[in-house]
Amino acid sequence: MNKIINPSKNIWSTLVKRASLSYEKIEPLAKAIFTDVEENGDNAVNKYSKKFDNVELDSLKVSKDEILKAIENVPHDLKLAIQNAKRNIKLFHKAQITKTVEVETQPGVLCWQKKLPIERVGLYIPGGSAPLFSSILMLAVPAKVANCSQVILCSPPDANGDLADVMLYTADLCGVDKIYKVGGIQAIAAMTFGTKSIPKVDKIFGPGNQYVTVGKQIASQYKVAIDLPAGPSELMIVADESANPDFIASDLLSQAEHGVDSQVFLVTNNTQIADKTIKKLINQLNALERKDIASAALNNSKVIYFDNYNDLIDFTNFYGPEHLIVCLEKNNEFIDKIINAGSVFIGNYTPESAGDYASGTNHTLPTNGYARQYSGVNLDSYLKAVTFQKISAEGLSKLGPTIEKMALAEGLEAHKNAVSIRLKSL
Amino acid sequence: MNKIINPSKNIWSTLVKRASLSYEKIEPLAKAIFTDVEENGDNAVNKYSKKFDNVELDSLKVSKDEILKAIENVPHDLKLAIQNAKRNIKLFHKAQITKTVEVETQPGVLCWQKKLPIERVGLYIPGGSAPLFSSILMLAVPAKVANCSQVILCSPPDANGDLADVMLYTADLCGVDKIYKVGGIQAIAAMTFGTKSIPKVDKIFGPGNQYVTVGKQIASQYKVAIDLPAGPSELMIVADESANPDFIASDLLSQAEHGVDSQVFLVTNNTQIADKTIKKLINQLNALERKDIASAALNNSKVIYFDNYNDLIDFTNFYGPEHLIVCLEKNNEFIDKIINAGSVFIGNYTPESAGDYASGTNHTLPTNGYARQYSGVNLDSYLKAVTFQKISAEGLSKLGPTIEKMALAEGLEAHKNAVSIRLKSL
């Protein structure tokens, strides 16, 4: 990890550069797959699954039997762990339920806002070396709290055409309605248009590689919403002498092991913490199974030292990290000044992995600086806010002239007439 | 207006077809303008303003003097109307403020969610024949309630290089920080990248023609968020014999006068209401100044009769109208079954134009069927939900084993280590 001392503000934008995404390169392939799936449905889906994932299946849908077998196969203690995580995630997302907002803005003019569930949601869970069942918890639990009427899940199967037992167990535990063995751009396209096997959805959630990410961007041009623009995972740690170098080294590595394009920053006003953490990092790194991935990620990563405490705050907000760990003497003072961050982990006993799995917060968070303007996935991601209004005859008699004047000033006579015709009838 | 009787469900998707948007055609021009503005800043902005809007300005920014003069010029009664509307809009959006959500999900594991303002927002207000100052109210008032630190506005000037007095008055009244005389794709590109005159923003709001709409879609590929995918305005009225044909004819026309691509539907289970409304519509239409626009819009529009009450509900939710007026004997029964709609207007004295201007609800709403998955602009559009967590040593000792088991099952050893190293230290 590169150590940088008191970088001046004019190089900050260079310092925080993220790995760039290759949208343009993938776009033509993705568009071709979308067109093919729109026209040829399951046939196209099966063709690309064979081509890219080397699987041929009789049925894309996971059967009840497969689920029952999977439930038997998951070890008891892992089940209990997943149930504990689910309980916490459900508690935290249930607490986000908002009541109807109702205001009589002036006498006889009643306005209210009510959140309604998005009906059909599709969850995408990537395949790969390990089964990412924690993402199922993070995406399916709030969907169920929100009362979405149809929750489906797509994930690419392994070479035998199977999904991991623990994935099926978790999806079933969370009440996912249907599970499909399909991945990649073809899965996103299938949920966008609907095929004979796979229903169309209104919104697509979930992480994925750059192909899936481009697929989701294209989906959003076809009247489907997506959760978040995705990018490689990030962690920033802000620490002073009150931090434990062994702990924060372990946190930096937990982020670095995600992928070679992960990015971690340690930002500190204490040189000893910087140096000690780098030492601890190297020790811990060498013992890791995913050492190669983590080492590569550390090449994108930096230790940054600032003399000035205010620079710690400014640099954090300038970066807008997906994950932010704060280990300072005065944590509260710092977190009150946070403007841009996805999720914040406070103090020595709050590792990022707590939020990744089980504390209750969501791990689907804005990367790539999007913490400036996007929320991570939360209950509202599965709801839409609809407004209602009911005006009494008396209410309109008072509000009407305001509307008439404004409509005329905008040159919209029929807008005025809709009020005038009613006022005249009174 | 075409009258259709008991359409069967298999033709519903044809019936509700919206005018299609021509993204692909405009995209190359829009991308070229974006690249030019990114590279050449104000020079490029000025070049396109001259080319497309035929204006050359010494300064893009509206001066304090211009604003003071504008304030003098706006008639007193129009000012009072705007102030009344502002008051109602502010009341309704202020009521949407949510408290921090805090949950101790298990002992020693404290999670909370807090909404933080998006720092820099840019509002786009279209030019054209009339000054759309109502959109300034709808976009700037919630930005200020949300406490966004920088609120800027772009709008194309007239041939003399001026913005309408009432626009400047309204923007000033709402506390807009800076106003720029620039429109079209070049305005969106300027807010995306920032130029010497115009600051970069984090999120762009506002309506616009198809050029601006494509510009906003491109902006969203450059780390800028946008409020909503835009489309032509729509109104659906669901009415039975309790409705007043004169009133609902006036509402249909108030929507139809927006533009030739506006779409209006009257859905009813009463043939007399259908026939009477069409008659009233023709009478009222002939008296309108914007008769030609409204007539053209009525060509995209339909009166639909259903025998079956449940079809009224199903068809409404199938369409997902931007605006929905409900005038039925039993309004409450119907509105409890609404799943997809942008904003709902209930009863005989609640014209859509009330919400367009002054009742307090927002008029920036999802069109084109996006009511399935998008909210209209509301307070949360200017905020992001950030999560926080703080775990005590005791809390981690209880939650830790859950995290360790899950991390190992996902093959992420360093995620487990970040917990284990802390548990060992206890």
Image (cartoon, coloured by chain):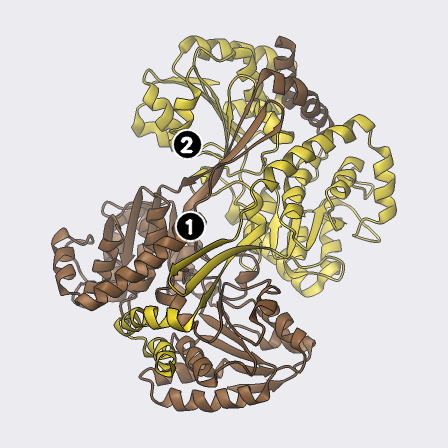
Chain colours: A brown, B yellow
Nearer to the camera, A156 or A239:
A239
A226 lies above or below B321: below
A58 lies above or below B279: below
**Residue B319 has which mark?**
2
Nearer to the camera, A415 or B286:
A415
How many residues crowd mark 2 within 10 Å: few (<14), some (14–19), many (20+)?
many
Q: Residue at x 60, y 63 (%)?
A: A336
Q: In this orientation, does residue B258 appear? A: no
| Residue depth check, mark 1 versus mark 2: number of the one nearer the observer | 1
Identify the element where label 2 is drawn: helix
Nearer to the camera, A327 or B252:
A327
**Residue A95 has which mark?**
1
Identify the element where label 1 is drawn: loop
Residue A233 x/y as whole percent: 44, 70
- Kindly identify which chain the residue marked by label 2 belongs to: B
In the image, taking residue A167 as reference, residue A240 lies left or right, namely right
- Kindly identify which chain the residue marked by label 1 belongs to: A
In the image, taking residue A132 as reference, residue B177 lies left or right, namely right
Badge 1 and badge 2 in a common chain: no
How many residues crowd mark 1 within 10 Å: few (<14), some (14–19), many (20+)?
some
Q: Residue at x 62, y 22 (%)?
A: B292
- For badge 1, the amino acid type reads Ala
Q: Quadrant of residue B272?
A: top left
**Residue B236 has which mark?**
none
Q: Quadrant of residue A310?
A: bottom right
A131 lies above or below A246: above
Residue A117 x/y as whole percent: 39, 41
**Looking at the rendering, in which quadrant would you find the C terminus of chain B?**
bottom left
- For badge 2, the amino acid type reads Tyr
